[in-house]
Image (cartoon, rainbow, N blue to C red):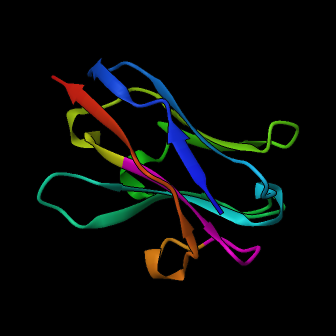
């Protein structure tokens, strides 16, 4: 399974970005997909997750109300819409797939990982 995260960039505080997680030869729609980030000098933390049926989502407290996770079934892609970005959101963001249908914010519960995309938010 090869996952590809894209959409990162350098933005100013208050701006928005949309990250995409896509794959080929694998159906994301059947599994829970999570977004994680690792800021410089910090460990990896779970940012958001969406269950396979979209019935369950998870958001890190610090991003609630600003970030939205969603799926495009036709494009086999999961998005993370990030609004009102803050300098504290600066990190490398990665998507991961869990071979289960339920969400988890624990990285060790995920089975496949993609390369990250860097998000830098300037103040």
- Residue 30 position within the rendered picture, expressed as x and y whole percent measured from the top left: 83, 64
- Residue at 40% over, 48% down: 116
Task: From the viewer's side, name the closer residue of 31 and 61.
Answer: 31
Residue 99, placed above or below residue 93: below
Q: Quadrant of the N terminus?
A: bottom right
- Residue at 46% over, 76% down: 106
Residue 112, placed above or below residue 38: below
Q: Which residues are magenta?
A: 93-103
Task: From the viewer's side, name the closer residue of 95 and 85.
Answer: 95
Q: Is residue 96 magenta?
A: yes
- Residue 122 position within the rendered picture, expressed as x and y whole percent measured from the top left: 18, 24
Residue 108, placed above or below residue 49: below
The image quarter in which residue 86 lies:
top left
In the image, 43: left or right of 20?
A: left
Task: From the viewer's side, name the closer residue of 5 and 70.
Answer: 5
In the image, 85: left or right of 28?
A: left
Q: Is residue 85 magenta?
A: no
- Residue at 51% over, 56% down: 114
Q: Quadrant of the C terminus?
A: top left
State whether residue 43 appears in this view: yes
């Amino acid at each position: 399974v090869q996952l590809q995260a894209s959409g990162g960039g350098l933005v100013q505080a208050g701006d928005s970005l949309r990250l995409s997680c896509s794959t080929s030869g694998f159906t994301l729609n059947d599994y829970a997909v999570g977004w994680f980030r690792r800021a410089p000098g910090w460990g990896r933390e779970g940012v958001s997750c969406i269950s396979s049926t979209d019935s369950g989502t998870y958001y890190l407290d610090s991003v609630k109300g600003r970030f939205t996770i969603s799926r495009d079934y036709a494009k086999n892609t999961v998005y993370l819409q990030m609004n009102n970005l803050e300098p504290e959101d600066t990190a490398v963001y990665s998507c991961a797939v869990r071979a289960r249908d339920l969400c988890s914010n624990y990285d060790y519960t995920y089975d496949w990982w993609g390369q990250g995309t860097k998000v830098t938010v300037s103040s």
